[in-house]
Image (cartoon, rainbow, N blue to C red):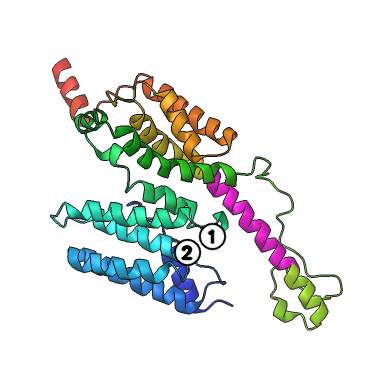
Amino acid sequence: MWSKTNIISTVILSSVLLTGMLFIAAGPQDSDIEREALLQDSARVEALGQALDLEGLEKVATELEKKWFPKNKEYYGHMVLQVCNTFTSRDFNNHRQYELARQYALLALDKSYGLEQNNRIPIEVEFRLLMYVRQSALASTKYLQSLGQKDDWPNQRREEAKLYFRTLDWLERAIDPNWDPNDPSLVFPRPPAGVDRFAIGMSPENIKDPNLRAEYEAALEEYRQRHKRHSEQRRLRRLKKEDLPILQKHLLRLYSGPLFDSKKLETEELQQDLAKHIKDEKIRAIILDGVKNRLLEESKPKPKAKPGFRERTETRRRSI
């Protein structure tokens, strides 16, 4: 049975905020102590943001970054994401706040890329951290055009683009093409034969026979793993549908010089940079095709916005 702390933590940590901060749904495998510590650290970051204490936030951010990486990679990713969100969503009246967000996002991504795939920070978090390092998306066209004239621009662009490549590579490798969204095996297991009186979803503790209880526990664990895999595949597909176009748009802008207007694609340069960072030719082709399709979408005429209340009122007034 979950404690009251577990329930409260799950409610708080499973919230997805519109600001871009994503927190996890804490599971029973995570310790109560770690969850409570995460909530306390989250509250510290929030308090410093509300107080507009940039110096204090930077100090705590450094402390928490070092604290959570060796303890829990998933919690680490979410904590850094909250720190970056706090740096950028508050008005500290100091331009350093944006550079600090980029600095901590880069640090977390670099550490994640160095880990085995099954131990990296959640891919959803990587996607959102990329939003804090996208210099090309935030820079003015004029500024990018000036960068594009410099001799080291190809290297500078490659350094930024490789961040996108590594996360997109993981996304494509993690998606199972054979996944069945209507998998019939995702049925909650019944207690084994020999258990006379039972209810679906009953706790193993209610089975007295140790052998039957162990058999039921094994069936429950197998179900949890199947359900986890099923939920993961559904999340990956939602991520690809909803968030991937944003990253594709940023890549398109990077590789649409010298005007950086997203109206052309430097295909050869993009292929060369992809080859430097992604070994799988099939995945390179998927990423390239995705950016090409984004170019086509960006080239389509944009539908005219529907007139608002003020415009409709003015039109009606003139017709009288």
Q: Main secondary structure of the magenta part?
A: helix
Residue 25, image x and y in percent? 49, 63
Q: Is residue 194 magenta?
A: no
The answer to whether 119 is drawn above or below residue 162 in the figure is below
The answer to whether 210 is drawn above or below residue 70 in the figure is below
Magenta region: 219-237
The answer to whether 48 is drawn above or below residue 206 in the figure is above
Residue 319, image x and y in percent? 17, 16
Work out how far the residue at label 1 is from the one at label 2, CA to CA, in angstroms: 7 Å
Provide the secondary structure element on which disc 2 rests.
helix
Disc 1 vs disc 2: Cβ atoms closer than 8 Å? yes
Q: Nearer the viewer, residue 318 or 298?
A: 298
Residue 278, image x and y in percent? 52, 39
Q: Residue furthest front?
A: 151
> Which residue in the structure is indicated by mark 1?
119
> Which residue in the structure is indicated by mark 2?
73
